[in-house]
Amino acid sequence: MQSIICFTSDFGLGDTWVGVCHAVIFKACPQARVVDLAHDIDAFDIRKAASVAASGAWQMPDAIHLVVVDPGVGGGRRDLILVTRDGVLLVGPDNGVLLPATWRSGGTVEAYAIDPANLHAQPPLATFHARDVLAPAAAALACGVEPSALGDPVDPLTLVAAPFERCREEGGDLLAEVVDIDRFGSVRLTIAADEVAARGLDRGRIEVSLGGHKETLPFGATFSDVEEGAAVALIDSSGWLTLAVRMGSAAERYDIKAGSTARVRPATR
């Protein structure tokens, strides 16, 4: 039974929202343990939340992932439970925020629209489904309730699209989107670790075209594989192919923002 709940939101810590969700989970399932992955995501930033959730699911596949960045709360969008082929459980709104995490864990095999009546709760407050629907659903899962008992099945093909696209092949290259830039300026691309290995990008050096720059970078295991100020490609804790500068910012060097497109291939020399 999965009793760890990894919680991601844009709630911040200056109000009651995160603490109340913790309390609701504890009251419904005292044995659950809530781990706060991130709550300082910019308000309404579904892209960043999806990136964090995908990283969390990659690092903690045996946890339940509760993800609440929800600009459409109360507006008719569905509250979801997704089950992936690798057994990861995801809880959040149907706004695309959960989908990248499913890419990292075998894809969605079951999807359910949560019915608040199945949670034995009062009708939810329109502005706080996190407290009244999503957190109670995560707590129920942590206590062993089957996802199918909490709502009706939905066709995964009807889910709202992710806020960024998966990488794709074009002319022998991989086209990838900048999914995220971390606080150190490292640039994460939508090329997952298994794709890096499958494409031979981890066998020496890679060629990257990004933001008007074309660079050939070494593929390393860590930042210190290059000299201070030098650039390196690696797989960081997010599980994405990442471009970094040792003791510097790759985003500043290449003038890159989230949403930019990169073309990546193994270097020929």
Image (tube, rainbow, N blue to C red):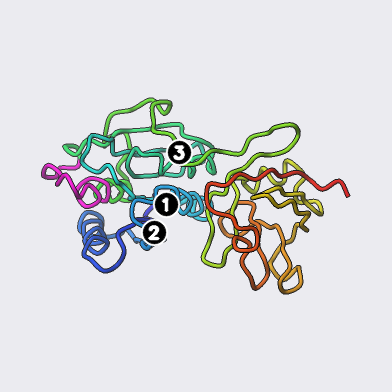
- The crowding category of the residue bearing disc 1, from other C-alpha atoms within 10 Å (few below 14, some 14 to 19, many at least 20), is many
Q: Secondary structure at mark 3?
A: loop
Amino acid under disc 2:
Ile
Among numbered discs 1 and 3, the one appearing first in the sequence:
1
Among numbered discs 2 and 3, the one appearing first in the sequence:
2
Q: Nearer the viewer, residue 228 or 22?
A: 228
Q: Nearer the viewer, residue 195 or 87?
A: 195
As drawn, the label of residue 41 is 2
Residue 256 is one of the magenta-drawn residues: no
- The crowding category of the residue bearing disc 3, from other C-alpha atoms within 10 Å (few below 14, some 14 to 19, many at least 20), is some
Q: Residue at x 37, y 56 (%)?
A: 8
Q: Which residue is mark 1?
A: 49
- In the rendered structure, the answer to whether residue 241 lies left or right of residue 182 reads right
Q: Residue at x 37, y 32 (%)?
A: 111
Q: Nearer the viewer, residue 139 or 41?
A: 41
Furthest residue in direction left, as rendered:
122
| Residue range of the region highlighted in magenta in the rendering | 119-135
Asked whether the residues under the numbered discs 1 and 2 touch, taking CB atoms below 8 Å apart as contact, a structural biologist would say: yes
Amino acid under disc 1:
Ala
| Relative image position of residue 54 (x, y in whole percent) | 49, 49
Q: Secondary structure at mark 1?
A: helix
Q: Nearer the viewer, residue 199 or 216?
A: 216
Among numbered discs 1 and 2, the one appearing first in the sequence:
2
| Relative image position of residue 26 (x, y in whole percent) | 24, 60
Task: Reply above or below: 148 against 250.
Answer: above
Q: Quadrant of residue 22?
A: bottom left
- In the rendered structure, the answer to whether residue 107 lies left or right of residue 38 reads right
Q: Which residue is mark 3?
A: 162
Task: Reply above or below: 80 against 207.
Answer: above
Task: Reply above or below: 205 against 107.
Answer: below
As drawn, the label of residue 223 is none
